Amino acid sequence: MKFILSLKSFIYILFFPSLVVSIVPDRSSISQFQSLSYGKTIVSSPHGMFELGFFNLGYPNRIYLGIRYKNIPVDNVVWVANGGNPINDSSADLKLHSSGNLVLTHNNMVAWCTRSSKAAQNPVAELLDSGNLVIRDLNSANQESYLWQSFDYPSNTMLSGMKVGWDLKRNLNIRLIAWKSGDDPTPGDLSWSIVRHPYPEIYMMKGNKKYHRLGPWNGLRFTGMPEMKPNPVYHYEFVSNKEEVYYTWTLKQTSLITKAVLNQTALARPRYVWSELDESWMFYSTLPSDYCDHYGVCGANAYCSTSASPMCECLKGFKPKYLEKWNSMDWSQGCVLQHPLNCKHDGFVLLEGLKVPDTKATFVNDSIDIEKCRTKCLNNCSCMAYTNSNISGAGSGCVMWFGDLFDIKQYSVAENGQGLYIRLPASELEAIRQRNFKIKHVTIVTAASGMLVLGIYFIYRIWRNINEKSKAENNYEGFVDDLDLPLLDLSIILAATDNFSEVNKIGEGGFGPVYWGKLASGLEIAAKRLSQNSGQGISEFVNEVKLIAKLQHRNLVKLLGCCIHKQEKILVYEYMANGSLDYFIFDLLRNTDHTKGKSLDWPKRLSIICGIARGLMYLHQDSRLRIIHRDLKGSNVLLDEDFNPKISDFGMAKTVGREEIEGNTNKIVGTFGYMAPEYAVDGQFSVKSDVFSFGILLMEIICGKRNRGRYSGKRYNLIDHVWTHWKLSRTSEIIDSNIEDSCIESEIIRCIHVGLLCVQQYPEDRPTMTSVVLMLGSEMELDEPKKPGVFTKKESIEAISSSSTNTLTITLSAR
Ligand SMILES: *[C@@H]1O[C@H](CO)[C@@H](O)[C@H](O)[C@H]1NC(C)=O
Ligand SMILES: *[C@@H]1O[C@H](CO)[C@@H](O)[C@H](O)[C@H]1NC(C)=O
Ligand SMILES: *[C@@H]1O[C@H](CO)[C@@H](O)[C@H](O)[C@H]1NC(C)=O
Ligand SMILES: *[C@@H]1O[C@H](CO)[C@@H](O)[C@H](O)[C@H]1NC(C)=O
Ligand SMILES: *[C@@H]1O[C@H](CO)[C@@H](O)[C@H](O)[C@H]1NC(C)=O
């Protein structure tokens, strides 16, 4: 033992000279002839992030040697040595042999061993704080060169600093392999790695089948991952040279813990971030990110767009191979050219905003420009498409595709994707040109015919509406066939709510009254009766409900069922015992029950703030659709009996395509006082408008006051108030007196800081909800907030007419 300690001190002195005094009693290495037995662990140095040891995953007689986070209690295993070959009792032993190899034996049989690249003289095995188990030679001059490292043989988890790809010198493919299931680390058949096409890309493979494709690296990002942008969490890199081809990412903030895990059950590769506050892994993003991300859903020569209906469309100049199949939404056979190619007399049509096709049959030359690329492609009759291989800056390099084009996806925001020049016969190009000209001709050249077209269009719309309504009303069951949600009979709801009696009415949401009710089973419900003039047809309603039904998050009110009967449309939600948040923070029941505000002490309020943030993040981030709430405020946050917050009224919010993060609307819904300036003024809504509303709500929760109101006779603007006090470092003066006793000042200041970041005037300055959740849940450094933007109709009019001195009235410059 003494020897171990002294050896360890030696290592410490060698590598961490300043840490000599803080030697922890855990071991962090195994040297020659030493062994690790069952029940013992090796702890990573110097910070003790990870440990190596023997453990089971719920079955006591299946024991694994593995690495896990030392201080995280759940889902903490990041690497397993003997995944497919567990040990059945505690007689396991891990030794470092003089050859420099770790050998795991059990009953004198080898259960697992490493194969070091060369023999060592004085080997040592060490666990690093990155989670990497390494073997190196103490006699070797280069201590960074390892004889073996676990990062070269990943399990299902990608950690910061790990490379996924190819070490070409050793012909080693470093890839993630999913576990068979959450409690069985036997390698499954789902893997994630780089495939070395001329234009390399990352595939998720299910067995031999392509399941998801991240697309090639285009100089800025993987073309199939538009959200890969400089972010506060991690830095990413793709390297391709003669020695290696790999993708890697590293954390920017050491206080954050994040991992990407390949999951066989979910057939996905989600990324999680550890939330200290919550003691759980928070979902951050996932691959595949939507339906169109599934490999080749549209077949050959077609493209997929989640915001289109149907999602698949043939490329211009192509037609469905089997029209009937195509029209019944079986797209697997794809599309073929409408007219045959003519080789030298062909041309190209540009399709923009794409995840470019599968690069299996490609050719790349980094030193050819786009004009030469075109010529080269034109001269080879089997070249079907070309584009720049690097879109950074003005674009450079040349990539060409041969044969059918597979797995193209189109983003609804063109900048998210990249352009592709697709080969078509000259005759086809001429037809396209004429079509475009005709469209221009009709809509622009003569105003009169333009009006006519418009008129016809409206008549068509009205006809279609009538048609759809009658169709829908006659057989709406058709729509709900695949609805994962109980369709309740009106009589059940009438019985539960006492025929919608006034006594049972518990609120008036944006879209109609809400009634409390009790089902025969005893379950309490909140039934929202949508006003009949909501203008929504049955099919739209059902579509909406289908979307909401898929939203499952503990910070969203759960939809239990719905009811459609003639004009009656009712949504049935779980009932929230403590009503809405505004009653508590604004003491609305002051006269009858003054304990309300007090009953929400600071810890509860903080957990409510974090809960709302997570709920909103889920709406913005969910993999299937992106939802902008548009009306987040205290009365739309409900509290269950344990004061867990649940966002409500999100169902009628705006859903936008996954890639489209902004929209424009003619009808501005929402509540003044919570609205972001760009939304209130221009009807420009985005996830960032929700972030703004969240910031306002956060400050209301802390201050116990409404953003807009009158207090002691004076007009009052909470954000103004908070900003002024923040600038003077006097935030303690604005805290709700109800939480003075329970508050922790540093937490409050951090919350206000985050709140101020959320209400900055320009949307691009505001953080995303994902960042907000991270900022609330960690110690990461925060940016200085810029001046908040606040706009309310009344104020601006007043400000203009009386040139008020209100410093916070924003300039409404068109942006
Ligand atoms: C454990 O496995 C070994 C073979 O690897 C077998 O001989 C032994 O009987 C097993 N022990 C138990 C308790 O199952
Ligand atoms: C995969 O995801 C499922 C939920 O979809 C989860 O229950 C399971 O534990 C996950 N497996 C792994 C290995 O993380
Ligand atoms: C892409 O182009 C940019 C700018 O021209 C250059 O800096 C970068 O190295 C290129 N990337 C690759 C992968 O060639
Ligand atoms: C790329 O193109 C340049 C210029 O045409 C040529 O000299 C070079 O040989 C090409 N490289 C490859 C790998 O084809
Ligand atoms: C066209 O390109 C393909 C793939 O690089 C090649 O095999 C073929 O020989 C080329 N044909 C001509 C005529 O250059």
Image (cartoon, grey):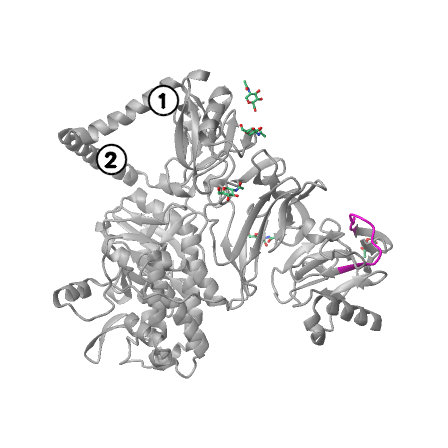
In which quadrant will I find the N terminus? bottom right
Going from N to C along the chain, the mark reached first, 1 or 2, is 1
- In the picture, measured across the screen, residue 777 lies left or right of residue 186, that is left
- In the picture, measured across the screen, residue 105 lies left or right of residue 55, that is right
- Name the residue rendered at 82%, 60% in the picture: 91
The three-letter code of the residue at mark 2 reads Arg
The answer to whether residue 334 of the structure is visible from this angle is no
Q: Quadrant of residue 417?
A: top left
Residue 463 picture location, percent across and down:
21, 34
In the image, is residue 808 above or below residue 197? below
Closest to the observer: 292 or 414? 414
Q: Are marks 1 and 2 in contact (CB under 8 Å)?
A: no
Is 124 one of the magenta-colored residues? Answer: yes
Closest to the observer: 388 or 233? 388
- Name the residue rendered at 48%, 24% in the picture: 377
Q: Find the distance from the CA under tag 1 to the CA under tag 2.
A: 33 Å
Residue 655 picture location, percent across and down:
35, 49
Crowding at label 1, few (<14), some or many (≥20) Cα neighbours within 10 Å?
some
Closest to the observer: 712 or 267? 712
Q: Quadrant of ligand 5?
A: top right
Residue at the disc numbered 1? 429
In the image, is residue 549 above or below residue 373? below
Q: Which residues are magenta?
A: 113-125
The three-letter code of the residue at mark 1 reads Leu
- Name the residue rendered at 63%, 52% in the picture: 162
Q: Main secondary structure of the magenta part?
A: loop
Residue 425 picture location, percent across and down:
40, 19
Q: Secondary structure at mark 1?
A: helix
Q: Secondary structure at mark 2?
A: helix
Residue at the disc numbered 2? 464
